[in-house]
Amino acid sequence: MFTGIVEETGVIDARTRTEDGLRLRIGADEVATGLEHGQSISVSGVCLTVERYEEGAWFEVFLASETVERTYLGDLEEGDAVNLERAMPAEGRFDGHVVQGHVDAVATVSNIESVEEDWFFEFELPPGYERYVVEKGSITLDGISLTVANLTESGRVTVAIIPTTYELTTLSAKEPGDPVHLEVDVLAKYVERLLEERFE
């Protein structure tokens, strides 16, 4: 489990296509320190498993074909940045919200507006996902735990970004039209399932 609090941004050092997927080598300082083989890491919101690593320098993950198809990680090039977070330890502090690292869909940046020191990002969700989102509720975009400031009936979500989040994540490099990984609050899915069973 993750919390959506990005620890650092890493850089794609190398990418290798295979018959059954894609292998990425990601350069990182803090996140690559104290790693273990088989450890889970959120890479821009996608839960992946560490296969190899060099202490304090880099780690490698493998993306199966399904992951390549469901995310935009396969479109990244060497030099591109990604948000990184290690799985939360049992004794860890819970600062964000429950993030599984299971991408529901790919949303799109539709507008970016700077207001004094803050930023307002608007995202267009794929049809059907707006039912899992409420104003002041939580949403995960590219692995970042964010609070919904506004939601339109057409499925556009606005979030307010403070300077720290803007500077320490890949949001500072985003432009309208760019993709982001969407993970809705899993609690909303559980509620929907319970209501469906109750009224069947």
Image (spheres, rainbow, N blue to C red):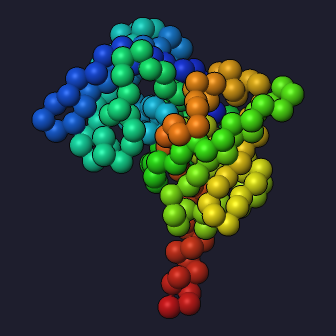
Across and down, in percent, residue 38 comes to 33, 30
- In the picture as drawn, the residue positioned furthest to the bottom comes out as 200
**Figure disc tally:** 0
- Looking at the image, which is closer to me, 38 or 71? 71
- Looking at the image, which is closer to me, 80 or 168? 80
Across and down, in percent, residue 90 comes to 57, 38
Apparent side of residue 109 relative to residue 134 in the rendered image (left or right):
left
Across and down, in percent, residue 199 comes to 56, 90
Q: Quadrant of residue 167?
A: top right
**Vertical position of residue 96 compared to residue 193: above or below:** above
**Vertical position of residue 125 compared to residue 115: above or below:** below
- Looking at the image, which is closer to me, 112 or 167? 112
- Say if residue 1 shows up in the picture: no
- In the picture as drawn, the residue positioned furthest to the right comes out as 116
Give me the residue at 60% from left, 71% from top.
Answer: 191
Apparent side of residue 173 relative to residue 23 in the rendered image (left or right):
right
Give me the residue at 44% from left, 20% from top.
Answer: 80
Give me the residue at 50% from left, 91% from top.
Answer: 200
